[in-house]
Image (cartoon, rainbow, N blue to C red):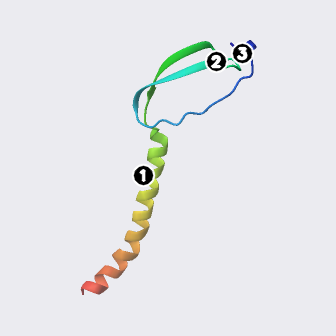
Amino acid sequence: MLENGDSTWLTLEPRATGEQTIQIFLMSSDGTIIEGKTRTIKVTKDMKTYLKKLTSIGSLLGGLAVPLAKVLPSMIG
């Protein structure tokens, strides 16, 4: 397949999780399809990124809670 021309690397960004289908075609310069493949892939959530976001939100809330905990007793009493 690569002996027919140049190669190109693409990065695909999924729109939804679940099973997705991608189609790959090798075309000549006049638009004729030389070869084509259809692939089914399973898209899942990236748990590492999700955990990073969750821990940073927790850190932010924890940082806000400390000053509020110190000020709140003086406001009530």
Helix, strand or loop at label 1? It is: helix
Label 2 crowd bin: few (<14), some (14–19), many (20+), radius 10 Å: some
For the C terminus, give its image quadrant.
Answer: bottom left
The tag on residue 2 is 3
Could you tell me how far apart the alpha carbons at marks 2 and 1 are, in whole angstroms?
42 Å
x, y (%) of residue 21?
46, 23
Q: Please say if 54 is above or below 3.
A: below
Label 3 crowd bin: few (<14), some (14–19), many (20+), radius 10 Å: few
Residue tagged by mark 2? 26
Say which amino acid is labelled 1. Answer: Leu
Of tags 3 and 2, the one toward the viewer is: 2
Depth check: give the residue in front, 75 or 30.
30
x, y (%) of residue 54?
42, 51
Could you tell me how far apart the alpha carbons at marks 3 and 2 are, in whole angstroms?
9 Å
Q: Earlier in the sequence, mark 3 or mark 2?
A: 3
Residue tagged by mark 1? 54
For the N terminus, give its image quadrant.
Answer: top right
Q: Residue at x 46, y 51 (%)?
A: 53
Number of numbered discs overlaid on the protein picture: 3
x, y (%) of residue 43?
44, 30
Label 1 crowd bin: few (<14), some (14–19), many (20+), radius 10 Å: few
